[in-house]
């Protein structure tokens, strides 16, 4: 039995909203050590920027992230500031 190679990963353009949000979340890798949690959070915040998701505090709490050296409220505040910067 043979296995096909995985599909190629299509990267987002550097100036896309998706790339900006996922890159911004990567800056918090010291506070959110699990890569899957960062990806899930970035996806949820991308929805927020598109008007389809919850506010950052609600998103952080509902994702039940395993945080290090930061509280949910502190992280949500930092995320809100970064998202405001991305929107403008």
Image: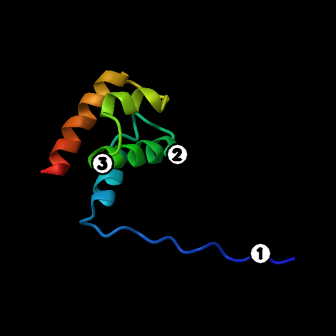
From the image, tell me which residue sits under label 3.
24
Crowding near the residue tagged with mark 1, few <14, some 14–19, many ≥20 C-alpha atoms within 10 Å: few
Query: Do the residues under discs 3 and 2 have CB atoms within 8 angstroms?
Result: no
Residue visible at 49% across and 41% down in the picture: 37
Residue visible at 37% across and 24% down in the picture: 72
Looking at the image, is mark 1 or mark 3 earlier in the sequence?
Answer: 1
> Which of 18/68 is in front?
18
Residue visible at 46% across and 48% down in the picture: 39
Q: Is residue 76 visible to the viewer in this orientation of the structure?
A: yes
> Which of 59/78 is in front?
59
Q: Position of residue 58 (x, y in %)?
A: 36, 28
From the image, tell me which residue sits under label 2.
36
Is the residue 59 above or below the residue 87 in the image?
above
Q: Position of residue 76 (x, y in %)?
A: 30, 30
Crowding near the residue tagged with mark 3, few <14, some 14–19, many ≥20 C-alpha atoms within 10 Å: some
From the image, tell me which residue sits under label 1.
3
Q: Position of residue 56 (x, y in %)?
A: 31, 33
Residue visible at 19% across and 50% down in the picture: 86
Image quarter in which the N terminus is found: bottom right
């Amino acid at each position: 039995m043979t296995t096909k190679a995985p599909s190629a990963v299509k990267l987002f353009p550097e100036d896309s909203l998706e790339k900006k949000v996922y890159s911004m979340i990567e800056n918090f890798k010291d506070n959110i050590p699990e890569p899957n949690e960062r990806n899930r959070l970035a996806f949820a915040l991308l929805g927020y920027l598109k008007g389809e998701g919850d506010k950052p505090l609600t998103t952080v709490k509902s994702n039940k992230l395993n945080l290090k050296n930061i509280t949910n409220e502190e992280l949500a505040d930092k995320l809100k500031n970064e998202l405001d910067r991305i929107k403008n």
